[in-house]
Image (cartoon, rainbow, N blue to C red):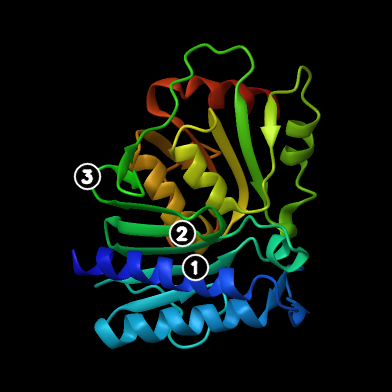
Amino acid sequence: MERIRLASQLAEDVGAYLRGAFVTPHDIRGKADGSIVTEVDIEAERRIREAIQRRFLDDAIVGEEGGGNKHAQEEGITWYVDPLDGTSNYAAGLPLFAVSLAYADAAGVQGAAIALPMSHELFYATRGEGAFRNGARISMRKSGDKKKPLFLVSYAHAVQHDERISRFLALRPRPGMRVLGSTVAALCWLAAGAADGGLFFGQHAWDYAGGAFIAQEAGGRVETISGDPLTLPLDQDVAIAEAESFQIIEAVKSRIFS
């Protein structure tokens, strides 16, 4: 329980920092993968890393902005940290972004906490205990045989020209679709029942570890788009829907890969 308490506190504290710095000008720099980073991303991750290392010196940390130990370890605990998911939104003045922390052992994610600072939402879950938003249990939407399901979609800058994304966007009739600019926020709202399913292409471990785990604890079936289990710390294409409604994912996949 110590780690989930720390994760939740850090998500809220760093979320407050992001919220306070939101309206200030930012130093925006490009990264090798075509995405951007600001001084706020770097400072947010520094705060998270230092706090984890003070409490759990032997834990490894895999974070988007690097620095310190950044490789998963085969034994013990590894943290997956995205200090500011939705940097492009943040830098543009769009108030949709998130802070994500997850910690995992050899069996997978043990617990996760995610803050959406501008809507004052804290999502969290621990293995086998369900998922919660601001203290209230959440569950994924049961879609049944819905004729036009709503999908939340995200794709990393590096894979934006992937043929599967083009095929999905070209589907007719097109499923309902929203692209939010924050994979982490999309995963959390999906877990809380705001949409029927999610397709997330080219995601790093820190993008999906926390949110996919929360969705799973909220009753979701979580796997790669090709149908394999998610494997940390690999980059993955992620597909999620409520476990008994996963046919909506299979139906779309059959058309994307046909």
Nearer the observer, disc 2 or disc 3?
2
| Along the line of sight, the residue nearer the viewer: 104 or 218 | 218
Disc 3 versus disc 1: nearer the observer: 1
What residue is rendered at 72% in x and 54% in y? 159
Tell me the kind of residue under disc 1. Answer: Gly
Secondary structure, mark 2, is strand
Q: Which amino acid, mark 3? A: Gly
Q: CA distance from mark 2 to mark 3?
A: 21 Å
Residue identifier under label 1: 15
Q: Earlier in the sequence, mark 1 or mark 2?
A: 1
- Mark 2 Cα-neighbour bin, 10 Å: few <14, some 14–19, many ≥20: many
What is the total number of numbered labels drawn onto the structure image? Answer: 3
Q: Type of residue at label 2?
A: Ala
- Residue 2, quarter of picture: bottom left
Q: Residue at x 55, y 83 (%)?
A: 43
Mark on residue 128? 3
Residue where numbered disc 2 is placed: 115
The local secondary structure at tag 1 comes to helix
Name which residue lies at 60% across and 76% down.
41
Whether residue 86 is visible here, answered yes or no, is yes
Question: In the drawing, what numbered circle is on residue 209?
Answer: none
Q: Relative to 255, does residue 213 appear above or below in the rendering? A: below
